[in-house]
Image (cartoon, rainbow, N blue to C red):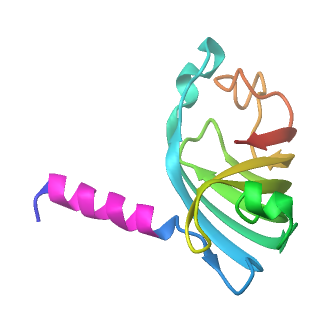
Amino acid sequence: MPSGMRKAAITLSLLFLTATVAVSQHAWTFRVYPGFLAAHHEDMQAMGSHVLGFEAGREWRIDKDGALAKNQKQPFAGIGINHLRMFNDINGNVSALFGYYDAGISGNEKTSLRFRLTAGVGLLSKQWDAFTNPKNRAIGSRLNGMMQP
């Protein structure tokens, strides 16, 4: 298989895996996050890398039949844990505990385009150290805030 086709097959497979697997009324979820850490300011220039993450969570319907359910397409809230492997010796890995709110933007009862806001705390395996990790100039502590739109 040519390199381009192999990359396309891997990408499509990973995109398929990112779909939420849920039981019943969005009770338990498992997600896979392939991606890339982009250097968004000068201190992070050496930290760009591929990322692969896994998430497990528990979700609860907020309003099944009321106005909120109608306007936000069956919203729900949840808690979860995740682990991200950042393929770079500078970054290390991160594990997080978080809460989230998920609302539908458009769609019907079976499918919808959704928006999720997540906030929590993350624990990093590597942070800046003048002697052991001087290239990580962006992250100075193991415990950090976590936000994900």
Q: Is residue 23 magenta?
A: no
Main SS, magenta residues:
helix
Q: Nearer the viewer, residue 63 or 59?
A: 63
Q: Is residue 10 above or below residue 129?
A: below
Number of numbered markers: 0
Residue at horizontal 86%, vertical 66%?
66
Dividing the picture into quadrants, the one containing residue 128 is top right
Residue 96 visible in image: no
Residue at horizontal 56%, vertical 25%?
39
Dividing the picture into quadrants, the one containing residue 103 is bottom right
Residue at horizontal 43%, vertical 61%?
15
Left or right, residue 34 beside residue 58: left
| View extreme (top): residue | 42
Left or right, residue 147 beside residue 38: right
Q: Position of residue 64 (x, y in %)?
A: 83, 73
Q: In this view, does 93 lie above or below 60?
A: above
Give the residues drawn in magenta, as a range.
4-16
Q: Position of residue 124 (x, y in %)?
A: 78, 45
